[in-house]
Image (cartoon, coloured by chain):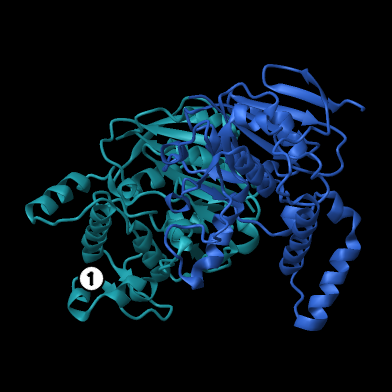
């Protein structure tokens, strides 16, 4: 079995340094392909950590999105399986993810938990917030065969303006393809996310940067009606708004096609064994 | 401000590689000194992570303990402050530990043994052994108690009691700031490298204790802590575990019952071992017991 980890990064180099140090501990991992989406401080120095690490640098992209850099990373994958991780998802070296999670060409794994329980045993309601800290962000994890990834066209590259939801959308398309969904065994603690403020989730997206009015309105609203002035709550509500917009625009219908077409084509130049530079080809 | 991180490692190089990747990123950290206590595989390759990293290799040590390798690492410290971390403590890059924790005059910062529940138990409770203290104070008190090598744990409590006895105020880390995280692992991983592991396993089998899986190791941890607590003083106010014990059980512990800023025990612990340390290159050292 051969596995490629793919990830997308914009200005999360510090977290990625920790996470990638965990990914390379696993013999099952043949390559780690990270698309650096024009980070202010490039992350290509991470290649010296391990010869399996490949960095694709994409310059001149003012805003982040997940689908385009992830599909770009996937385009270089040579392994039979793709594991998509966020740049702050740590693989626990004490509990091997691959021992606990098996998929084949009829199945796929994500962190999507529509039951919203995230554990096998119902957690004490007093401690649910802790699950959100360490485990809920694993929602975007994806583990699937390379063939099935490309069968559905990878992530939907139209979803590039607002934060999040491409993970739920691709989950639904894999189900439409007829694959069986495998849950992450959250209780085994094979993966965890580095906790951070909610602002981190939205701050690099076009819809956040260009629509400061939304932030202002939310801030004024909760201050007036809830007497709350909390930056984290403001950004949680912004994220929620982005999610709703994505849902409205991209929620699949019964007759939707499980396969999506790429929006972007790339000219990829290999700089060294481990480094690439990619430019968008004008359509 | 200059900080040296010290840690001790035996066969935990994978976790250490992840933790160190977090430590080296903080500007406040000037050096990271790891004592590699005869791990089966070399960890010298970790020096590639940063010029800040220094590895002291100690060979021919069958069993792990914390005090000796930590004191050895501390002997090379050049910074004003020492931050002792376990090799599976991550400093969260999203929340700077040093912005939330400052060692003020007459104080030290220590992990808290307050029993945390839920997922926090796995990710925060085991920060217990963290210590952030002035280097001068660490050395004045003789560092960790090197007599505590056989059984797992409690050297952290014992040192905290001596620091209090010396006249410093303990400040518990603000774990809920999430600036430090523990990588969850099994209880077996906690105890298996200690000398007492085999003897306790034997005792358990002789008494016919019927523990399964992780419960067995949890019981071993309790036994190890009890053994150490019988001999070395602990502060009642620092150990929530005492709330779980009845009076008859408490009498087995050498407890400093009242902590109101004063504890009167001998704060100096005389090191047992002396070392001959040879510098191999800028980042690698070898140490042999004299």
Q: Position of residue A202 (x, y in %)?
A: 77, 54
At horizontal 85% and vertical 26% (from top left) the residue drawn is A279
Q: Which chain is blue?
A: A
Provide the chain ID for the residue under circle 1.
B
The answer to whether residue B31 is seen in the rendering is yes
Q: Position of residue B199 (x, y in %)?
A: 15, 47
Residue B82, placed above or below residue A124? above
Write down the residue under mark 1.
B253
Residue projecting furthest to the left? B206
Q: Which chain is cyan?
A: B
Side of B267 where A127 appears, left or right: right
Side of A157 where B118 appears, left or right: left
In depth, the one of B82 and B187 nearer the eye is B187
Q: Residues within 10 Å of mark 1 (few under 14, many from 20)?
A: some
In depth, the one of A50 and B155 nearer the eye is A50
In depth, the one of B152 and B92 nearer the eye is B92
Number of disc labels: 1
Q: Quadrant of the N terminus of chain B?
A: bottom right
The answer to whether residue B23 is seen in the rendering is no
Label 1 secondary element? loop
Q: Quadrant of residue A48?
A: top right
Q: Position of residue B288 (x, y in %)?
A: 33, 32
């Amino acid at each position: 079995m051969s596995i490629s980890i793919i990830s997308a990064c914009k200005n999360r180099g510090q977290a990625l340094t920790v996470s990638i140090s965990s990914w390379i501990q696993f013999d099952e991992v043949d390559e780690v392909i990270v698309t650096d989406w024009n980070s202010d401080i490039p992350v290509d120095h991470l290649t010296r950590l391990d010869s399996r690490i490949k960095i694709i640098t994409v310059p001149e992209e003012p805003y982040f999105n997940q689908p385009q850099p992830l599909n770009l990373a996937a385009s270089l994958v040579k392994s039979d399986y793709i594991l998509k991780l966020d740049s702050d998802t740590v693989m626990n070296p004490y509990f091997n993810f691959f021992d606990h999670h098996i998929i084949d060409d009829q199945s796929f794994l994500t962190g999507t938990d529509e039951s919203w329980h995230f554990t096998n045993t119902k957690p004490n309601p007093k401690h649910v917030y802790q699950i959100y800290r360490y485990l809920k962000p694993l929602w975007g994890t994806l583990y699937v065969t390379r063939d099935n990834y490309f069968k559905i066209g990878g992530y939907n590259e139209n979803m590039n303006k607002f934060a999040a939801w491409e993970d739920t959308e691709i989950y639904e398309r894999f189900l439409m393809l007829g694959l069986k969904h495998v849950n992450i065994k959250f209780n085994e603690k094979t993966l965890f996310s580095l906790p951070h403020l909610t602002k981190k989730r939205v701050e690099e997206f076009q819809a956040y940067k260009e629509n400061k009015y939304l932030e202002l309105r939310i801030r004024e609203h909760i201050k007036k009606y809830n007497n709350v002035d909390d930056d984290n709550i403001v950004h949680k509500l912004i994220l929620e708004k982005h999610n709703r917009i994505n849902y409205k625009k991209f929620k699949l219908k019964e007759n939707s096609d499980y396969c999506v077409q790429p929006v972007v084509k790339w000219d990829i130049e290999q700089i060294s064994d481990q480094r690439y530079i990619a430019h968008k080809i004008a359509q | 401000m200059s900080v040296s991180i010290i840690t001790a490692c035996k066969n935990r190089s994978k976790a250490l590689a992840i933790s160190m990747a977090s430590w080296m990123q903080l500007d406040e950290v000037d050096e990271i000194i790891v004592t590699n206590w005869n791990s089966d595989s070399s960890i010298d390759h970790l020096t590639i992570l940063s010029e800040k990293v220094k590895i002291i290799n100690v060979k021919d040590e069958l069993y792990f303990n914390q005090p000796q390798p930590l004191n050895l690492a501390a002997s090379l410290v050049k910074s004003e402050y020492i931050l002792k971390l376990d090799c599976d403590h991550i400093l969260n890059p999203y929340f700077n530990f040093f912005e939330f924790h400052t060692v003020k005059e007459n104080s030290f910062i220590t992990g808290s043994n307050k029993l945390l529940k839920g997922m926090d138990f796995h990710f925060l409770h085991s920060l217990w052994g963290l210590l952030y203290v002035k280097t001068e104070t660490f050395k004045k008190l003789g560092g960790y108690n090197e007599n505590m090598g056989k059984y797992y744990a409690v050297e952290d409590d014992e040192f905290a009691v001596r620091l209090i006895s010396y006249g410093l105020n303990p400040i518990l880390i603000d774990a809920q700031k999430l600036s430090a995280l523990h990588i969850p692992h099994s209880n077996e991983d906690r105890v298996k490298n200690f000398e007492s592991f085999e003897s306790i396993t034997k005792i358990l089998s002789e008494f016919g204790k019927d523990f399964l899986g992780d419960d067995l190791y949890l019981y071993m941890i309790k036994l190890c802590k009890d053994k150490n607590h019988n001999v070395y003083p602990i502060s009642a106010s620092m150990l929530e575990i005492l709330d779980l014990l009845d009076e008859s059980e408490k009498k087995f512990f050498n407890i400093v019952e009242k902590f109101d800023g004063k504890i009167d025990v001998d704060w100096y612990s005389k090191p047992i071992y002396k070392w001959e340390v040879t510098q191999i290159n800028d980042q690698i050292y070898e140490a042999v017991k004299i």
